[in-house]
Image: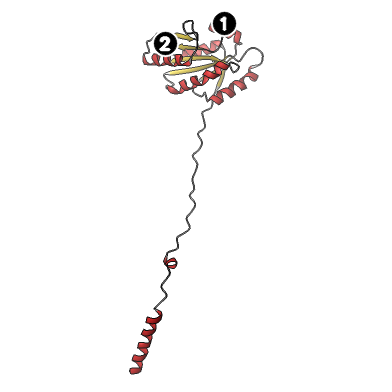
Amino acid sequence: MQQHRNMLASICLGCLLVGCGANPTKSEAKLEQPASKPTSITAPASHQPAAVKLETLSHEQLQARLAAARGRVVVLDCWATFCAPCLKEFPRLVELSRKYPADKLQCVSLSFDNQGLDSLDKIAPSVQAFLDQRQAANVLNVLSTDEDSLLYEKLGFAAIPTVFVYDQQGTLVKKFPSPESPKFEYGQVERLVAELLANPVLK
């Protein structure tokens, strides 16, 4: 019995001296974290601008399109890729076309690039490229099948840039530049459009 007690005491003393197990170090006690998975970020699909359409129309066909726009204010901008003042002001037409709903305002760009020196197939690409660059998707873009000299005669003016503004009844309200406003500035067009939209009966 005494021997058994002595053996028990020896075992307990050994436990006190060496411990019942090595205390885990801080690093060992820390649970191993699972490797974090790389976050997959999907880039948003790039916004593709709407396609810009260029139509080839005769003067008569253009007039029919303008008549079909009755009920809306119409801005007809006459321009050409070789006309520096036209190109400078063209972005203002595009901005105007985006400012108001399509059922309130119809913006039309009429290219005078057809000087009778080349076929429309050869002229159209440079006109299309410029319109694409300016993202003129909200504009009715027209390349006239009539040579520019005939088009000047039919529309009754002598030089570009020229802008016609029609009211909701299809009546020509003003042409820019005009005798009273010989210095053309697109702000004049924008102000007139705003007035016509605010007061549809304005003449």
Q: Disc 1 marks which amino acid? A: Glu
Camera-side residue of 133 and 106: 133
- Give residue 139's position: percent from left, percent from top: 50, 21
Q: Is residue 109 left or right of residue 9?
A: right
Question: Few, some or many C-alpha atoms within 10 Å of disc 2 (few <14, some 14-19, many ≥20)?
Answer: some
From the viewer's perspective, is residue 187 above or below residue 27? above
Residue 191's mark? none
Q: What element carries label 1?
A: helix
Q: Residue tagged by mark 2?
A: 169
Q: Name the residue nearer the viewer: 70 or 184.
A: 184
Q: Which residue is drawn at 42% across and 15% down?
A: 191
Image quadrant containing the N terminus? bottom left
Residue drawn at x 47%, y 8% as measured from the top left: 181
The image quarter containing residue 19 is bottom left
Q: Which residue is drawn at 48% across and 18% down?
A: 107
Q: Residue at the location (57% across, 12% down)?
A: 58
